[in-house]
Image (cartoon, rainbow, N blue to C red):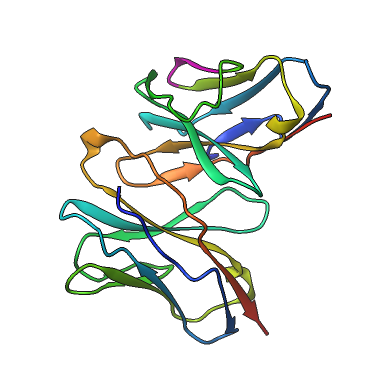
Amino acid sequence: DAGVIQSPRHEVTEMGQEVTLRCKPISGHDYLFWYRQTMMRGLELLIYFNNNVPIDDSGMPEDRFSAKMPNASFSTLKIQPSEPRDSAVYFCASSSPWEQYFGPGTRLTVT
Amino acid sequence: DAKTTQPPSMDCAEGRAANLPCNHSTISGNEYVYWYRQIHSQGPQYIIHGLKNNETNEMASLIITEDRKSSTLILPHATLRDTAVYYCIVRVGDKAAGNKLTFGGGTRVLVKP
């Protein structure tokens, strides 16, 4: 298996632009998670899905952030409009009952 | 989920065992102890988990005290590639509760030649 796939690996955008991050989970996993990592706040859970349904989005920082999972093999995290404080590494992870498998992350820089 | 306390950093010598402590004094009976690590610029990687018995796999051993208030992750023969941040996480093991993980600050381990 190729593992969790994220794209793009790096994204540089200007403040105010829309940013879409993509994730393909491991086939057969029924949980999908989006995390954000910064030096100041560490690794934070933003939202997670079970069987394509959002379960807990309490970590989503504000309405500018939205996430979707239209099917079992694809999820997106969208930021609109983006701000410099959104600069971070965004990780997607999918899960078997016990272990979470993380993707390589998307490094987002908002200038 | 119960809170965990880990030392912020530690060094160990290549080839020697690395013992990483974790305190989780408020752990509940249905909470498991998980260990993940994050090598620089990569996503976190699952290492091992346990409830109350000691566990071992190809990566590490997990020793949980009898009262379950603390645990130790043991890397039996540390290599330079084990340099990473190690996270100890406690969470409810019931699958119905979801697999949500809350990451703390972790221990930054530096393996030296």
On screen, residue A50 versus residue A41, left or right, reads left
At x 59%, y 77%, the residue is B79
On screen, residue B24 versus residue A86, left or right, reads left
At x 61%, y 43%, the residue is A37
Do we see residue B62 in this rendering? no
Question: Which quarter of the figure has residue A36?
Answer: top right
At x 22%, y 33%, the residue is B96
Q: Nearer the viewer, residue A46 or A41?
A: A41
Compared to residue A60, the image places residue A95 above or below, namely: below
Compared to residue A53, the image places residue A89 above or below, namely: below
Question: Which quarter of the figure has residue A30?
Answer: top left
Horizontal and vertical percent for residue A68? 50, 16
**Residue A68 within the magenta-colored segment of the rendering:** yes
Q: Write the start and end of the magenta stretch as one range.
A: A66-72
Horizontal and vertical percent for residue A83? 74, 24
At x 38%, y 68%, the residue is B22
On screen, residue B8 versus residue B93, left or right, reads right
Do we see residue A97 in this rendering? yes
Most common SS among magenta residues: strand
Compared to residue B18, the image places residue A88 above or below, namely: above
Horizontal and vertical percent for residue B86? 50, 63
Q: Nearer the viewer, residue A32 or A88?
A: A88
Compared to residue A59, the image places residue A37 above or below, namely: below
**Residue A43 within the magenta-colored segment of the rendering:** no
Viewport quadrant of the C terminus of chain B = bottom right
On screen, residue B48 versus residue A12, left or right, reads left
Horizontal and vertical percent for residue B107? 52, 66
Question: Which quarter of the figure has residue A27?
Answer: top left
